[in-house]
Amino acid sequence: MEKIPMTAAGYSQLEAELRQRQTEDRPRIIQQISEARSHGDLSENAEYHAAKEQQSLNEGRIAELEDKISRAEVIDVSKLHGDIITFGATVTLVDEDTDEERKFQIVGETEADAKHGKISITSPIGRALIGKKKGASVEVMTPKGAKGYEVLKIDWV
């Protein structure tokens, strides 16, 4: 069974979503199914079929969350340090073409959110950054072609 690396915050998010789906969403969906059943003929009852579909999706997500939580390897980023980029590092980069600065934290796949500055360790830029030091140049293949970055700063927040 392969472990899934994640930060403590990412683990907490998964736990919170699982708890919500089990304690709030599941009972609400069961109630919707019960109400739809009371309307009679199930073969032509759109509310019933929609609620059953919603139940199926919810139960699938619950199973997925339970699997990820059971395989989680929580890494305490606050205990990490050093001058080499590894999982959990917050990296400030400068685009070598535009001089635009960008800041990313390297996290697990389950918590990656590029809009909020969290990139997956398995993403092209995440893989390119691992093992690099401050001042290193990194070339990343993106859908728009090769992109060059320079590592300006490495933080452990």
Image (cartoon, rainbow, N blue to C red):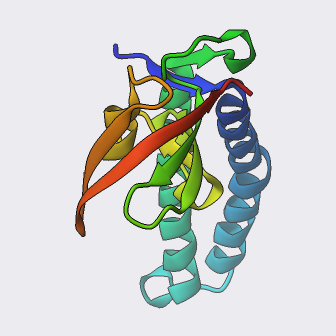
Say whether residue 122 is visible. Answer: no
Q: Quadrant of residue 101?
A: bottom right
Q: Residue at x 69, y 49 (%)?
A: 21
The relative height of residue 81 versus residue 56 in the rendered view (above or below) is above
Quarter the N terminus occupies: top left
Residue 27 image point, x, y percent: 75, 54
The quadrant of the rendering that contains the C terminus is: top right
Q: Is residue 41 above or below residue 67?
A: below
The residue lying toward the viewer, choosing from 55 and 43, is 55
Question: Residue 130, how many percent across, how many down?
Answer: 39, 26
**Where is residue 118 drawn, in percent x and y?**
57, 46
Residue shown at the point (57%, 54%) measured from the top left:
102
Q: Would you say 90 lies left or right of 143 here?
A: right
Residue 43 shown left or right of residue 36 in the figure: left
In the visual, does 153 lie left or right of 31?
A: left
Residue closer to the observer: 79 or 49: 79
Q: Image point 50% across, 33% down: which residue? A: 108
Q: From where the camera sits, is residue 12 visible? A: yes
Which residue occupies the extreme right position in the image?
24
Q: Residue at (24%, 69%) from the top-left corner?
A: 144
Counting the numbered discs, the total is: 0
Q: In this rendered view, identify the residue nearer to me: 116 or 145.
A: 145
Q: Position of residue 94 (x, y in %)?
A: 50, 51
